[in-house]
């Protein structure tokens, strides 16, 4: 009661001042929403924006914890200090030493993401004199999960500032943005610092520093930290099985590798009615359709092994669901209720095009084989257009029925 009373007193003390939004935000985050509905015309539910955001964060926590273990596992694996893990429950993977590396590398990313993002949110709330919105709670968790493990903290801070200001605040804040803020941040990182986002070595902690030491003449073995997509884009053979890719014990962004945990997170979001199952399912169908088309083209002999597109086009169509950030993007970012389509039919169209275009970009852009980010951002822009034509189509059908009845 002491802390609650103190916060309430501060809230009353600064009521009507410039700092009121900041104190209100702290109070509502820890306790109850600042405003509740009154009167009989409102539907009373226990849900609100804060609880919705917290449910999405809960769905991502397993991916975060797994990513910490995977960071250490990949680090020691490429150094030759441990052997490959045999399955999801192998103690080689779930080792305390792996977690220590993960904590050292991932937690600073989380702290910088939330620290910079929330500071900007508070600043805009104070300047514009409106309540601080909880929308960044999810974005702040998404960002560390979709970047390479060795991303410099200053680089992440610059990207977060850009994404929050340009991707959300200039449109009016949470609920008004047309682009997913987390993907805007990743897009900024990719285009501003492409060697860090598309390079082979940055996906494994210490790989860059070790390669620099080798270049300087130190007697060390060269290592590789490239992702499955990176290897396939260069026409290399992949040493990982489908089960490795499903479990997620492969190099990649912090939280994007485990299709198993992402699947469980997606089911949790569907069960809590936070995520749209229509968007998730249609995205998967779109990806499978594009993958099947590419497999058919290879089988027909139109593409030879000498083609730079052959390796990714020849990849089993369903493997595309397990590699890269497709699964993570589909579950946690394509379903963003603000930037996605709002109509049921629009969600089917929106999701299918995301999956279809993701694999299309992945195959035909070897320099950047991860296409789900660009596909989702592209469809964010077209989501209102899709909904517009769906609504107009419904209006026309109803008008026709009305004319038939009145005729």
Image: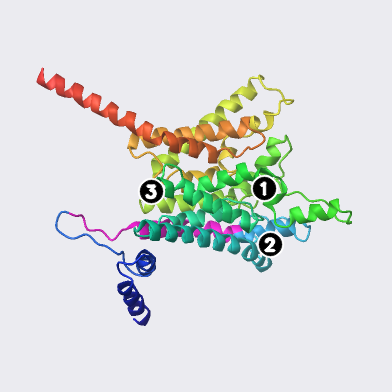
Q: Earlier in the sequence, mark 1 or mark 3?
A: 3
Say which element carries label 3: loop
Looking at the image, residue 346 lies above or below residue 273: above
Residue shown at 62% from the left, 44% from the top? 192
Say which element carries label 2: loop
Reading the image, the residue beneath label 3 is: 172
Which region of the structure is painted magenta?
Answer: 42-67
Residue 196 badge: 1
Looking at the image, residue 153 lies above or below residue 363: below
Residue 255 appears anywhere in the view: no
Reading the image, the residue beneath label 2 is: 92
Q: Is residue 9 left or right of residue 93?
A: left
Label 2: few (<14), some (14–19) or many (≥20) C-alpha neighbours in 10 Å: some
Residue 55 highlighted magenta (yes or no):
yes
Residue 358 badge: none
Residue 279 highlighted magenta (yes or no):
no
Q: Nearer the viewer, residue 400 or 36?
A: 36
């Amino acid at each position: 009661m002491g802390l609650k009373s103190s916060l309430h007193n501060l809230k009353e003390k600064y009521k009507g001042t410039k700092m009121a939004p900041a104190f209100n935000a702290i109070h509502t985050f820890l306790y109850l929403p600042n405003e509740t509905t009154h009167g009989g015309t409102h539907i009373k539910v226990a849900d609100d924006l804060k609880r919705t955001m917290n449910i999405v964060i809960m769905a991502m926590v397993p991916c975060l914890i797994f990513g910490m273990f995977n960071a250490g596992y990949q680090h020691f694996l490429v150094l030759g200090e441990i052997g490959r893990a045999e399955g999801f429950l192998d103690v080689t993977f779930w080792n305390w030493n792996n977690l220590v590396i993960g904590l050292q590398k991932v937690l600073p990313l989380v702290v910088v993401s939330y620290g910079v993002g929330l500071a900007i949110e508070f600043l805009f709330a104070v300047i514009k004199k409106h309540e601080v919105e909880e929308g960044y709670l999810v974005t702040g968790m998404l960002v560390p999960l979709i970047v390479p493990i060795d991303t410099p903290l200053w680089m992440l801070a610059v990207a977060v500032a850009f994404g929050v200001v340009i991707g959300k605040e200039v449109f009016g804040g949470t609920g008004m943005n047309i682009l997913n803020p987390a993907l805007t941040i990743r897009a900024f990182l990719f285009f501003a610092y492409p060697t860090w986002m598309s390079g082979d070595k940055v996906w494994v902690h210490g790989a860059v520093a070790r390669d620099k030491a080798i270049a300087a003449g130190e007697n060390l073995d060269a290592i590789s930290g490239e992702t499955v997509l990176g290897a396939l884009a260069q026409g290399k053979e992949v040493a990982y099985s489908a089960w490795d890719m499903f479990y997620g014990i492969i190099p990649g962004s912090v939280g994007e590798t485990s299709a198993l945990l992402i699947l469980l997170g997606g089911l949790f979001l569907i069960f809590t009615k936070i995520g749209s199952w229509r968007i998730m399912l249609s995205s998967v169908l779109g990806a499978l359709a594009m993958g099947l088309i590419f497999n058919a083209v290879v089988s027909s002999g139109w593409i030879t092994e000498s083609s730079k597109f052959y390796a990714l086009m020849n990849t089993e169509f369903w493997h595309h669901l397990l590699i890269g950030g497709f699964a993570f993007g589909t579950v946690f970012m394509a379903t963003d209720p603000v930037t996605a389509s709002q109509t049921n039919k629009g969600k089917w169209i929106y999701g299918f095009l995301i999956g279809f275009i993701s694999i299309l970009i992945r195959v035909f852009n070897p320099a950047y084989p991860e296409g789900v980010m660009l596909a989702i951002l592209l469809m964010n822009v077209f989501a209102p257009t899709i909904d517009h034509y769906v609504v107009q189509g419904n209006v026309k059908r109803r008008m026709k029925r009305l004319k038939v009845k009145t005729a």
